[in-house]
């Protein structure tokens, strides 16, 4: 990772150039997948629909991995267990909530 610091107009600027090694590790993908799986399973249990089990699992896992991808791309969190787990849970719960809200409004309309 390359870092540069310069001053312009009395302001200090720091520029960091990534060397492409800031992606998620295999452990983080496994953690996000497990968190999404658990949240998807709980969503299926709460919705009491036996036909939507694979859909809930897929949406939960996809939400967890997608949230981690975007948060890691903006370099907002470190590559540690609890931040990755927190982002995974928030991402999977958020995407599942949007998915179920869209299904509810689709049934009404």
Image: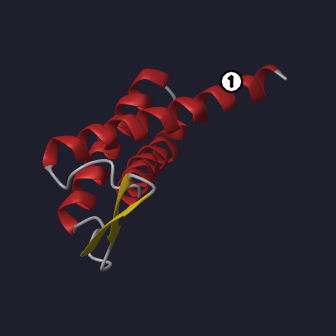
Residue 37, located in which quarter of the rendered image? top left
Which residue is found at the position 21% from the left and 52% from the top?
78
Instruction: Return the x and y of residue 70 as percentages of the image width and height.
Output: 44, 54
Q: Is residue 4 above or below residue 73?
A: below
Q: Is residue 80 above or below residue 98?
A: below
Image quarter in which the N terminus is found: bottom left
Q: Nearer the viewer, residue 88 or 13?
A: 13
Instruction: Bin the neighbour count of mark 1 within 10 Å (Cα to Cα): few under 14, some 14-19, many 20 and up.
Output: few
Q: Is residue 104 rendered to the left or right of residue 15? A: right
Image quarter in which the C terminus is found: top right
Q: Nearer the viewer, residue 90 or 23?
A: 23
Q: Which residue is mark 1?
A: 104
Instruction: Return the x and y of residue 56 as percentages of the image width and height.
Output: 48, 41
The residue furthest front is 9
Which residue is found at the position 24% from the left and 47% from the top?
84
Q: How is the image coloured?
A: secondary structure
Instruction: Return the x and y of residue 82 as percentages of the image width and height.
Output: 16, 41
Residue 89, located in which quarter of the rendered image? top left
Which residue is found at the position 63% from the left and 26% from the top?
101
Q: Nearer the viewer, residue 84 or 98?
A: 84
Q: Is residue 19 rendered to the left or right of residue 49? A: left
């Amino acid at each position: 990772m390359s870092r540069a610091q310069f001053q312009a107009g009395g302001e200090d600027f720091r520029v960091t150039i990534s060397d492409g090694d800031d992606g998620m590790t295999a452990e983080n993908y496994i953690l996000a997948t497990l968190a999404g799986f658990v949240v998807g399973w709980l969503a299926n249990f709460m919705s009491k629909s036996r036909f939507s089990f694979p859909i809930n699992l897929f949406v939960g896992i996809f939400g967890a991995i997608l949230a981690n991808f975007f948060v890691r791309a903006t370099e907002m969190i470190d590559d540690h267990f609890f931040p990755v787990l927190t982002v995974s849970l928030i991402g999977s719960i958020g995407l599942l909530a949007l998915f179920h809200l869209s299904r509810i409004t689709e049934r009404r309309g």
